[in-house]
Amino acid sequence: MKKIIIGENIVKSFGVDNEQHNVLDGVSVAINEGEFVSIMGPSGSGKSTLMYAISGMDGINSGKVSFDGSDLSAFSEKELADLRRTKMGFIFQQPTLLKNLNILDNIILPSMRDNRKNVAKITERARALMTKIGIGELEKRDITQVSGGQLQRAGICRALMNNPKIIFGDEPTGALNSKSAQEIMDIISEINTEGTTVLLVTHDPKIAARTERILFMGDGNIVSEIRFQKFTGTDIDDRMNKVMVKMREIGI
């Protein structure tokens, strides 16, 4: 199976002078095209830092990250920004939407940079995504006039606008109630089923249990993993039990 991301001996340090601390301490990881992966670990274990490193959002001190066959270290900052905008999608715990724009305009804004002459086509795609994800009737609403779950759906629409090869999610359900979290995971799972690679950082074992592979981090490295079949909805209890056992084993 083709690997969309390969990280080799990644080191990421924070601090100054002799007070450097390796948040990532020689991490190696590979993500297959079309895979659905989650990363778990205690606070400070490096799970979000790893996601930022392999997506090119943050630089690394040493090691190598390849995306779709290209070494990210060879890219300029502008090229990295273009890569993230055109081939990656990002969903965060708190969607970063602009208060002075309505939902539709927030969704199409990032896509306008390269397609100013195709406003009608961009708007058509945004509306199609909004309808598919269940917020088609909210396009003229301000971001203060919708729920947290609806805002997250808008964030997903924006992440999908350029048909990315991979979706990165940093605690995408962390600010939602359990019902909204399940609905968002249903949407993300469908996106993956349609062929898009998905990588999530989460602290929630129920969210992780719906993915195909869980990477467990501790002290700046991947210390264990679990592999599952595609989630069908009928085996959540068994998957949850396996996740909880592994969490206890490694002290999460």
Image (cartoon, rainbow, N blue to C red):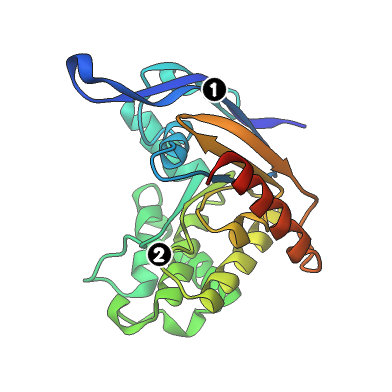
Q: Which mark is residue 46?
A: none
**Residue found at x 67% / y 30%:** 3
**Where does residue 127 sit, x and y in percent of width and height?**
50, 73
| Secondary structure at numbered mark 2 | helix
The amino acid beneath tag 1 is Ser
Label 2: few (<14), some (14–19) or many (≥20) C-alpha neighbours in 10 Å: many
Q: Is residue 24 visible?
A: yes
Vertical side of 51 occupied by 204: above or below: below
Where in the figure is residue 164, as x and y percent of width and height? 55, 47
Kind of residue at badge 2: Ile
Quadrant into which the N terminus falls: top right
Q: Position of residue 56 (x, y in %)?
A: 42, 32
Q: Residue at x 60, y 23 (%)?
A: 69
Is residue 218 placed above or below 127 in the rendered structure? above
Q: CA distance from mark 1 to mark 2?
A: 28 Å
Q: How many marks?
A: 2
Q: Position of residue 16 (x, y in %)?
A: 19, 21
Disc 1 is placed on an element classified as: strand
Examine the rendered structure and indicate whether residue 49 appears above or below residue 150. Answer: above
Q: For residue 37, say whether it is visible.
A: no
Residue at x 34%, y 69% (from the top left corner): 105
Q: Examine the image and state in which quarter residue 120 appears.
A: bottom left
Residue in the foreground of this view, choosing between 110 and 241: 241
**Among the 4 quarters of the image, the one containing residue 192:** bottom right
At horizontal 78% and vertical 54% (from top left) the residue drawn is 230
Count neighbours of disc 1 (C-alpha within 10 A) and say few if under 14, some if 14 to 19, many if 20 or more: few
- Mark 1 in CB contact with mark 2 (< 8 angstroms): no
Image position of 214 (left or right of 104)? right
Q: Which residue is mark 2?
A: 107
- Check disc 1 and report the residue beneath it: 70
Please report whichever mark, 1 or 2, sits nearer to the chain's N-terminal start: 1
